[in-house]
Amino acid sequence: QVQLVESGGGLVQPGGSLRLSCVASGSIFRINAMGWYCQAPGKERELVASITSGGSVNYADSVKGRFTISRDNAKNMVYLQMNSLKPEDTAVYYCNANIWSRAPYNNVNYWGQGTQVTVSS
């Protein structure tokens, strides 16, 4: 009964910016790591960025210096600020979170439904 819902995708010109948001809701006891993955047509889903509950971050080499991941633990939210976007960033972006739920007490890796990001002139 936990779900992740993303928002903020869309169409942007090369060099532009977008901010993705993801909120976790439901019977949540604790959220561990959260992250963003992307999947382009014909490619496998791959990690874009992740952040631990303590704030340690990790980025794919392709987005270092352009994307910033952050989270608000009080709101159960994670964000991805994407700057200097390139056409090759075009993909469906998925929110991911490792969550301990309350009832039943269980640890599961949850995924959002995905949000499309298209970078094109």
Image (cartoon, rainbow, N blue to C red):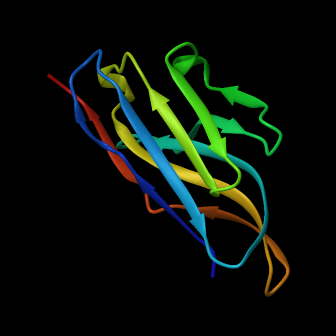
Q: Is residue 44 above or below residue 57?
A: below
Of residues 101 and 42, the one nearer the viewer is 101
- Asked which quadrant contains residue 75, the reply is bottom right
Of residues 5 and 62, the one nearer the viewer is 5
Residue in the picture at 35% in, 21% down: 85
**Quadrant assignment for the C terminus:** top left
**Quadrant assignment for the N terminus:** bottom right
Of residues 76 and 40, the one nearer the viewer is 76
Q: Is residue 29 above or below residue 84?
A: below
How far across and how far down the image is residue 44, in percent? 51, 43
Left or right: residue 97 versus residue 106 is: left
How far across and how far down the image is residue 113, in percent? 44, 62
Left or right: residue 77 versus residue 52 is: left
Residue in the picture at 45% in, 55% down: 6
Of residues 115 and 68, the one nearer the viewer is 68
- Asked which quadrant contains residue 18, the reply is top left
Q: Is residue 47 above or below residue 59?
A: below
Left or right: residue 37 versus residue 73 is: left
